[in-house]
Image (cartoon, rainbow, N blue to C red):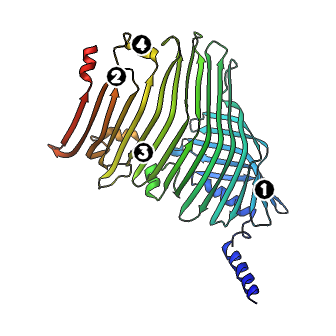
Amino acid sequence: MKLTRTLITSLFLALAAEPALAELTAEQVLEHRLSQYSTPEITVRAGGKRRSGNVLTVDRFLAEVALPDQEGTLLVAVAGASFAERNDGTVLVTFPPQFPLTVQAFAANDEEFAFAATVTQSGAQTVVSGTPDEIRYESTAPSITIDEFRMIEPEVPDDVSVVASIKMLGYEGHSDIIEGEVRDVRSEDTLDTFQVHVDVSDRGGGGSFTLQLEIADVSAQSSGSIAWQNLGDSLVTSIVNGSTFDLSASLGHARYLISGDGPNEEPFEISSESTSSDVSVRMDRSGIDYGGTTRGSVLSILAQELFGARMEVRLPEVNARFLLPIVPGNLPQDFAARIAVQGLEIDQMLWSMFDPKSVLDHEPATVVLDTSGELIVLRDGLDGDFSEIMKMDHAPVDIRSIDLNELLIKLVGVEVTGDAAFAFITRHEEPWPVGSAKLKVTGAGRLLDGL
């Protein structure tokens, strides 16, 4: 009897814990996906729908975007997908191995812009579970490539060649979405490699250009709330309506390369790589809070007309943080700005250009600037109408205080340190700083003696 009660209790708890597994249908998943992108100005449609047994097939998706201020219309068309209902209550979404992507823009002045590309993927799929009100997407995509870009309108001259590709390898991720007046979203994503390659050549004598970008080991976690909004709404309006965003991400080895030659066939090359990076972004009523750290950076420049040989700059570590209030209000809000460059090394060839006698100290340089304070945001500076801001007879913000938390400069044998604190009061209708600052300089005498 005890065993029977235990089995019944376990079965009841299992059913109670997973009520959603038998509730999702392919149609519900399709409608949910379409609703994620739809706004008053964006209409997303599924064309060629048909059902066979437990599988709903969509031939194509078309997004129509009405641009703000009646500037025109943007159309994006991609292939469809298959939505298969499974016995465990989930829906499996799969995609064609290859399909076209087309983008068209029709401006109000009858100008037209259009291009097409080909998307090739291997094994991309999404498993959808939950209910329409609390839904989870779990996605994998071993390989996705977008290439064969073709400019349709305006036409590219015959003597100009453009070859471009975007590739993503080893993507895995999941997102949880809770529907409501304000939609809550949480997601985690990983990507083994992200690559971009662009080659442009002008056989008519205009030179050539190459761009290569590769980022490895990308990992990101994000959460936020998405309020209903119009396409033309500013970021401030979206935040006031309830939208928030919080992202933290890490990147492994990253490298970009820009190279080519001009009409005079002089080659140039700019490349940069880093061993790892961290990025964080938060947006809410307190403003935009950005932080980032990059490690092991090397910048290389080859421009024979300027330097005659390749030049390198090394940055073992660079980190920055910016907190910018953007929501107008009557009360002071915190702001902050910090940048720190640790161990900057400049190529000896560059030193020789302005220190040919090696008088200066060539040790790695350090620069740290850390400030914070309070200000009042007087108006929305992100609404896109910068002409109105330029007409204002005062700044869009009113600074109430500013602190210099840290100042450190170590360069050419000179070290500068300091801190400061100022409040701003109004005198004769103008802001007036009141406070104090401390500054200390060492090594300047030795520098002057050597010059």
Q: Read off the residue under disc 3.
A: 382
Distance Cα–Cα, label 2 vs label 1: 70 Å
Q: Residue 106, position in %: x, y?
A: 62, 38
Percent position (x, y) of residue 421? Answer: 23, 44
| Residue receiving disc 4 | 352
Q: Are marks 4 and 1 in contact (CB under 8 Å)?
A: no
Which-is-in-front pick, marks 2 and 3?
2
Q: Earlier in the sequence, mark 3 or mark 4?
A: 4
- Marks 4/1: CA–CA distance: 69 Å
Residue matched to label 2: 412
Q: Residue at x 27, y 44 (%)?
A: 402
In this rendering, does residue 433 appear at all? no
Query: Which corner quadrant holds the C terminus?
Result: top left
The amino acid type, in three-letter code, at marker 3 is: Leu
Find the distance from the CA under tag 2 to the CA under tag 3: 41 Å
Residue, disc 1:
49
Nearer the observer: mark 2 or 1; the answer is: 2
- What is the C-alpha distance between the residues marked 3 and 4? 45 Å
Badge 1: residue crowd in 10 Å (few <14, some 14–19, many ≥20): some
| CA neighbours of label 4 inside 10 A, class few (<14), some (14 to 19), many (20+) | few
Residue drawn at (21%, 38%), measured in percent from left and top?
437
Q: Nearer the viewer, residue 107 or 6?
A: 6
Residue 331 visible in the shown view? yes
The secondary element bearing badge 2 is classed as: loop
Nearest to N terminus: mark 4 or mark 1: 1
Percent across and percent down for residue 101 are: 71, 40
Mark 2 neighbour density, 10 Å: few (under 14) some (14–19) many (20 or more)? some
Categorize mark 3 by other alpha carbons within 10 Å: few (<14), some (14-19), many (20+). some
